[in-house]
Amino acid sequence: MKNLYIALLVLVSFNVWADATLSGVVRDGSNNPMAGVQVYVVGGYNFENIYYDYTAVTDANGEYTIHIPYGATGHNIASRYGKYYGWYDFENQPITIEVLSGQAVPHRWNDSGGKALSCALGCYEEPVVSNETIVLGAGTFTATLADIQMTGTGKIYSGEVTDTNQQALEASYVQLKSTQNSPFKSGYLEVVTDVNGQYSFPMVPNNAQMHVSAFKPSYIRTFHDGTLCNLNAFCIPAEYTTNTLNDFILQKGGSLVINPPTMPQNVSSIYRRVYVHNSKGDQIHTNCTWYDANSTCRIDGLLPSEQYHLIFLGRNYDNNNQGIDLMRQFHNGQVIGCGSHFEPSNFPVSGMTVTAGQDTVIAYPDLQPGTQIRGYVIDKDTQLPITVGSSGYGYLDFELIDSTTLKSAGLLIANYPQNNEWTFSNCGFAAIPDGNYYLSAANKIDYASFVDGGQDTMDYKRFVHDGIDCQGKLCDFTNATEITVNGNDINGLEVTLEKGSRIEGCYYDNSQNPILYQNGDEFLSSKLSVHIYSDQNEHIEIASDIYLDMGNNQYHLCYSSSALPAGNYYVRTNNGSAKLLDRKNVLISSISGFDPSYGYFDTTPGIGSLDCSGHLCVMNTAITLDGSSHVTRDFYLNQGSVISGSLKDNVTGSLLADKNILAELYQNNVLIGQYQFISEYAKFLTPGLHDGDYEIRLSGNANYLNTSLLNRGGQSTSQLTDRIPVTINGASVDIGTITAITDMIFRDGME
């Protein structure tokens, strides 16, 4: 950072009130001072966070001053994932300064003057370089930065927010968010309406594609196209706005008011929490937490048309501060599973509903103590307890399975005492209810084990507690012995594990160059996946991602399977929605923020054809595992074209990420792929495909959709068909938004 101290006039002194002060001037293209320019502090991993607590607006002389405290303190942060509250220590950490105004496109400070950018608030398209960073050293840090000169024109999003009575809504929040195709890579840029309900954003580049939404406490979050959402749910409209003027009419939502829990007798303190999920399983609220019995929790802006599932869990503490876990409970009194691992398929059939403009008041239920399962793990070969060293660098995981439904009931916590022997115990803040269960355990893959290729580690396969080998991640409990929980803790349960082999490797392009985890602004981990098949063509698992550090902030995208028994296996890779099956795992698997304009197809020797297009192709040559070592299988991939599209509900107009409806890909009347409509964009995405003619059809249960759309089939901009032909000729194709009508497809807005 020597260049920084040459470029800045730095005055350093030491003071007990240690903080940093940054100041400078913003000028226009004619070198005149610019007033009213917003100045932001940007930092964090990949410089993706903007710290709202440390901003400034230039005065009439174009001058700004920002004070930044040292020490780990809480901050209001905005990132590409949204706004949140987090902790950050600025001392000795690099930051940069970005500026936005209504007069020029966003710019970033650098020591030779301002720099024109096509993004702001966490710029991925053009990474921050060394002469654009400021390292806030120890002690009081004062720096006068080089002037920033703003040039370039773009567009400004503005409008007004009113209620259903056409009354202006002052202090409403309006958010601007880039689409997955936009070169403008901001996260959430937020402004507040004035007394007349008016809002206006700083200028963004002309080629930015944006979603705009508005909300206010007690009102429902509404997008530019009328899509209604719970505030914290993963919801996004099908299309970005083509207008820079977007007015909003906000509807009153319903509210949940949860009364405080009752303080039990002979308890010194409590911990209580409630999780709120919608009917799809999306977690929409987690901030209701109690450490005493004195306060209520209020959740506003809920959709009257939605059903909500509330899950209550907690712990009591005695006078010795020993925690007693309690059984978690749903809003209807149902007691299922343990811990904070929630399986939506375990949710009650019916959820709670709210009424627009009204409070729905509920009492926090009295949670009851439950049972714990505790035990230890043994190595099958040595018959000795598995220690931290012998199990490799990764952790062991223990999953509890309901023997009746065969669904996950929770994850037991792996831990080890001072003798380093692995043990397991409770689910974490939620005890186990009475019932019959199975327990499976395995050694998780991690980075160090991958780098060492399994040397000096023991990669343990997944086993049921009574010794049944799960063949990777699939467990057959047909002949397994049940664990019966009946009011008493179970202690000393022994689980025996045996080591296995792993299939692992990395991705390269067809010129043998590493494919990086992040190429430019693309998150390729959401495009690429490796699937493991048995020699009977049974799908075993999707391998785990590994990001191999190559230095210079570059990570080679690699993968590793779970530990597998000896035998023959097939592997294949493709990009597409097959990777994105878990729509709750949004931070990892959301396609928000990447451009689905291309995909990859496999050109690795040994596959079924020279280029393996489609979803259903596998290798001709099996990979043989000996049950103890790691086997490397790298993939060499060519870039191809993809087909994508969205699915929406014809009644609400909102997107549908329904796992029961599949987009099917056909070529020459042969099914070559099936893809779910997933993530917040309800997108399906094929792997890379060759030029040629294809068809998209739908399958699955779509009977709940309103068939009144049959009456719209004669409109000039609509088609009613059971298939959509798609021709690829050197470029990817997005078929737009479609609506399913039983076994038909309604294609909206397409000729």
Image: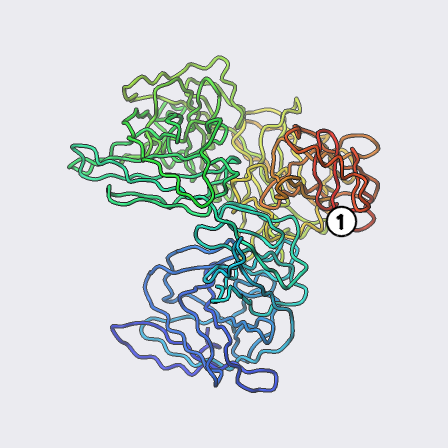
Name above or below for residue 692 compared with residue 245.
above
Residue at 67% over, 53% down: 513
Q: How is the image coloured?
A: rainbow
- In the picture, residue 582 is in which quadrant? top right
Name above or below for residue 539 compared with residue 138.
above
User: Residue 728 location in percent, x, y?
Assistant: 81, 46
- In the picture, residue 664 is in which quadrant? top right
Name above or below for residue 671 compared with residue 77.
above
Residue at 39% over, 30% down: 330
**Tag 1's secondary structure?**
loop
User: Residue 515 location in percent, x, y?
Assistant: 64, 51
Most extreme residue toward the front is 165
Name above or below for residue 400 compared with residue 588.
above
User: In the depicted view, which residue is nearer to us: 241 or 621?
Assistant: 241
Q: Residues within 10 Å of mark 1 (few under 14, many from 20)?
A: many
Residue at 49% over, 77% down: 3
Residue at 36% over, 62% down: 89
User: In the depicted view, which residue is nearer to us: 306 or 153?
Assistant: 306
User: In the depicted view, which residue is nearer to us: 116 or 33?
Assistant: 33
Total marks in image = 1
User: Residue 184 location in percent, x, y?
Assistant: 61, 62
In this picture, residue 472 sits left or right of residue 327: right
User: Residue 93 location in percent, x, y?
Assistant: 41, 65
Kindly identify the amino acid type of the residue bearing the numbered disc 1: Ser
Task: Name the residue beneath numbered marker 1.
Answer: 732
